[in-house]
Image: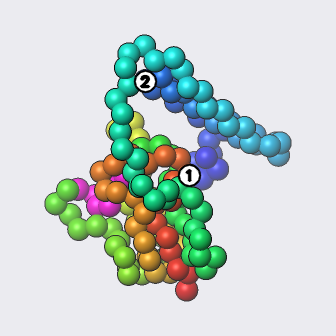
Amino acid sequence: MKLNSLSEFELEKEGFKIKLKRSINGTEDETSVEKMPASRPQKSHTPVAETGSAAPSKDPVLVDIKAPMVGTFYLSPSPESAPYVERGSQVNPDTVVCIVEAMKVMNEIKAEVRGTVVEVAATNGKPVEFGQTLFRIKPN
């Protein structure tokens, strides 16, 4: 939100509502999430990673790149393109590592750290949650 100068964001979709507010005058940030009554049966889906990829990295020398929003995770700009990065790839702070599609907008996610990709923690083409670990980077 700071990066895009947003002070408030609200999303409501199929029985789920999230509202984020960021104060500009220095008071604490506020986040609220509501599960709204479903008006129709919801489809169940398999979690993106069965190993709990949203948990913080267990190795203190690794840096997690986390999803900045809810959306669909893509490793490449198109299905026929090579992935932006894979395990062993070198990245710098400006390296685009993936795309998270949210509301038909393709958001390029940058590494924001210099290092080596040691793990791709999300699955290509699958949903990701806000704050979920997408990649683990060994800084150098």
Residue shown at the point (57%, 31%) measured from the top left: 18
Q: Position of residue 138 (x, y in %)?
A: 52, 80
Of all residues, the one furthest to the top in this rendering is 39
Q: CA distance from mark 1 to mark 2?
A: 21 Å
Amino acid type of the residue that numbered disc 1 sits on in the rendered structure: Gly
| Residue 100 visible in the snapshot | no
Marks counted in the figure total 2
Residue 52 in magenta?
no
Q: Position of residue 29 (x, y in %)?
A: 74, 42
SS class, disc 1: loop
Disc 2 residue crowd, few under 14, some 14–19, many 20+, Cα 10 Å: few
Where on the picture, by quarter, is residue 74? Answer: bottom left
Tell me the number on the disc at residue 131. Answer: 1
Where on the picture, by quarter, is residue 42? Answer: top left
Give the camera-side residue of 45 and 138. Answer: 45
Q: Position of residue 50 (x, y in %)?
A: 42, 55
Residue extent of the magenta highlight: 73-78
Instruction: Check disc 2 and report the residue beneath it.
Output: 14
